[in-house]
Image (cartoon, rainbow, N blue to C red):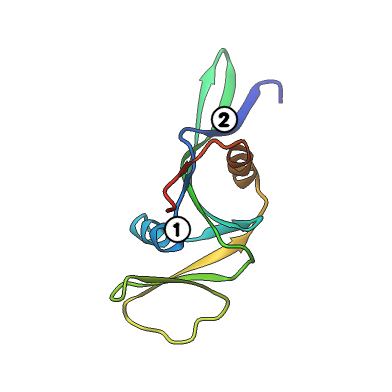
Amino acid sequence: MDRVLYVGPVILDEPEEFSLSEFTRQAVAMEAERLYYSNGRVYFVEYDTVHGIIDGKLVVVELIGYSSFVTVGEYRSWIVYYGNDDLAEYVNKIKDLRGDMTIIPVLRTHDRFIRKIEEQINEGRFRSFVE
């Protein structure tokens, strides 16, 4: 193991805070397959793992390229976006299926990526677009 160096996760840019509708629009536009819930917030995270050899060691770096969040309070299972109405909902149950719907599951987590983002938010290092 002394020949492997692990670095990360490393955040490349400050997390961005949005309203539920704008957060959902962005998640849909970026083709999010899932969102993550932790401590009253829902997160969208894009990350990548890069690796290479430096000084004879395998170096593995986890990079968070983009992250955004919305404050929601309690956990619910889904974010639903109605494209024709430009309407977003944060729900536990999906009632009616429509052709213009995008449904994104929300998973509870406390993984290292979310903890790293929360740490930065708690330090006040994020951009807010909430009015």
Image point (63%, 58%), residue name: 40
Q: Nearer the viewer, residue 16 or 111?
A: 16
| Residue 95, position as x, y percentages in the image | 49, 86
The residue sitting at the bottom extreme is: 96
Q: Nearer the viewer, residue 89 or 128?
A: 128
Marks 1 and 2: CB-CB under 8 Å? Answer: no
The quarter of the picture where residue 87 lies is bottom left
The secondary element bearing badge 1 is classed as loop
The secondary element bearing badge 2 is classed as strand
Name the disc covering residue 19, or none: 1
Q: Please indicate whether residue 29 sits to the left or right of residue 103 in the image.
A: left
Q: Please indicate whether residue 131 sits to the left or right of residue 116 in the image.
A: left
Image point (60%, 70%), residue name: 76
The residue sitting at the top extreme is: 55
Image point (58%, 56%), residue name: 41
Q: Nearer the viewer, residue 34 or 56?
A: 34
| Residue 6, position as x, y percentages in the image | 63, 28
The residue sitting at the left extreme is: 84
Q: Which comes before the other along the chain, label 1 or label 2?
A: 1
Q: What type is the residue that disc 2 sits on?
A: Val
| Residue 13, position as x, y percentages in the image | 46, 35
Which quadrant is home to the N terminus? top right
- Separation (CA) of disc 1 from disc 2: 34 Å
The residue sitting at the front extreme is: 131
Q: What type is the residue that disc 1 sits on?
A: Ser
| Residue 82, position as x, y percentages in the image | 36, 74
Q: For label 2, count other residues whose C-alpha is less than 10 Å away and answer few (under 14), some (14-19) or many (20+).
A: some
The quarter of the picture where residue 92 lies is bottom right
> Which residue matches tag 2?
60
